[in-house]
Amino acid sequence: MVHDRKSALALVEALSRELYINGRWRESSTGARYSVHNPADGSAITEVADASVADAQDALAAAHAAQRDWGATTSRYRAELLRRVFDRIIERTEDFAALISLEMGKPLAEARGEVAYGAEFLRWFSEQAAHLTGSYAPAPNGGYRIVTAKQPVGPSLLITPWNFPLAMATRKIGAALAAGCTCLVKPAPQTPLTLALLMQICHELDVPAGVVNYLPTLDAAAQSRALMDDARLRKVSFTGSTGVGSILLRQAADRVLRTSMELGGNGPFIVFDDAELDAAVDGAMLAKMRNAGESCVAANRFLVHEAIAEEFTERLVRRFEELVVGDAFDPASAVGPLIDAKQLDKVTELVDDAVARGARIRVGGKALGGNGYFYRPTVLTEVPGTARIAHEEIFGPVAAVTTFSTEEQALERANATEFGLAGYVYTRDLSRALRFAERLETGMVGVNRGLVSDPGGPFGGVKASGLGREGGASGIEEYLETKYLAVQL
Ligand code: SIN
């Protein structure tokens, strides 16, 4: 059924809002709970259990105890189980979409898109699980055989963000389970409900006790510290800010834990003067406005050739003007609220700073007002290089347009950032597209395309944007060790 806000709230009431540890729902050991809010109006949706450090340690004990049996299951078994979870998520698309919309704020249509995207990671990794391989080769001196096999890394801590509450979790859980790792999932405090439904489905489909554990908490730092200090944990995978990622990396170094880090971005979106303008504007809308700009792969800096900059900007402004900002459950809404007051303040500050330094507002430029955390879709031009927005990740519906005159200049400006997650380039000249893409210091490049995210593609960054890849053929490798056997014949 397609939900409205009332039925979405009823769905929440029917959901377990406890911790999920060792195959059981249970309260926090301290009895603590915290409130989850709807960003469209700041109202409290419900309360969920707040996991203590002791709860996290119980979950790790369960994950550790389950590891041997789970790692020994056949990959066919794991593949079929993941496939059943995929099917069940698809069956419950409307329920997942409603929970995502309620706690995160994105419009229902966009939330359905996230459900399809998020579920697809489980299908992708179910297919990967069934294709784990090893190798057999003569040693170079011919005296023995080199045999390699893949083995699961072991219990993994998966820390997920609020911007894609389902998809960023399935991207990690799917890979971990497919590889034979048990896991502990820590959702962002703002968006625990979507994953509570996923845990319920895992329970219904008999994912063995201890294989997946769920630990919402307000004290993420204490939780991750305790878990990462414990020798039973073998891996941490994190999606979030570069600041938090580097703290986790330092902590992980103490015990030489395997890490995967999907961190911040500052995506350049380059439009050359020979670009197909309609396609470039469509791509810009997608790269900028997907998820209201709250995505690490969002276009952050538009670099447009000076010969077409005005035409491109006018078209972009017209498209921004058409966007309806509103509540996720209103079918007219195309752009939802930002996640919370802190994020709204940050976007407001970035725009105000740019304007104070000489940027021109072509549309938008302020918050919508009211109780929700809505910001008007905004296009800025004449953004000076000194503006904070030229260097910081925006995570909001704001496009900052600047111009360039030569390819070298575009490249230099595009690469003038510590980040390197995704970039986008629009040109009809294939040689230039490839030349430019090769020199762009990012892990992913959209060539005449405003969306790179795909479970079949290796998602990840270079420079301060992270380590490792999620999805694609390499995603499962993040949760596997290569065991080498030297076999004397
Ligand atoms: C992110 O914002 O972290 C990733 C979004 C995506 O997978 O497209």
Image (cartoon, helix red, strand yellow):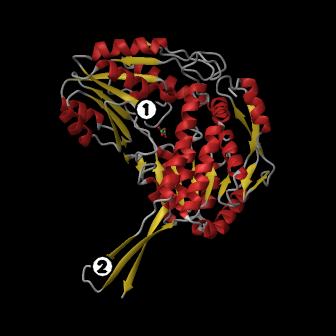
- Residue 391 spot, x, y in % from top left: 38, 33
- Residue 287 location (% of width, % of height): 41, 29
Q: Could you say whether the residue bearing mark 2 is in a helix, strand or loop?
A: strand
Q: Which mark is residue 140?
A: none
- The tag on residue 138 is 2
Does the rendering let one see residue 60?
yes
Q: Residue at coordinates 68% horizontally, 28% vertically from top-left? A: 38
**Image vertical order of residue 330 relative to residue 268, above or below:** above
Residue 372, image x, y percentages: 64, 21
Task: Report the side of 113 relative to 7 (left or right).
Answer: left
Judged by depth in the image, the label closer to the viewer, 1 or 2, is: 2
Return the residue nearer the eye: 281 or 423: 281
Crowding around mark 1 (Cα neighbors within 10 Å: few <14, some 14 to 19, many 20+) is many
Give the number of marks: 2
Of callouts 1 and 2, the N-terminal one: 2
* Residue annotated with mark 1: 298
Q: Position of residue 309 (x, y in %)?
A: 28, 17
Question: Image quadrant for the C terminus?
Answer: bottom left
CA separation, marks 1 and 2?
A: 47 Å
Q: Residue at x 50, y 63 (%)?
A: 257
Quarter that holds the N terminus? top right
Q: Amino acid at mark 1?
A: Ala
Tag 2: amino acid: Pro
User: Foreground residue, 57 or 77?
Assistant: 77
Give the image quarter of residue 149.
bottom left
Q: Is residue 439 left or right of residue 109?
A: left
Instruction: Tell me: is circle 1 under 8 Å from ligand 1.
Output: yes
- Drawn side of residue 62 relative to residue 164, left or right: right
Q: Tag 1's secondary structure?
A: loop
Label pair 1/2, CB-CB below 8 angstroms: no
- Does residue 250 appear anywhere in the picture? no
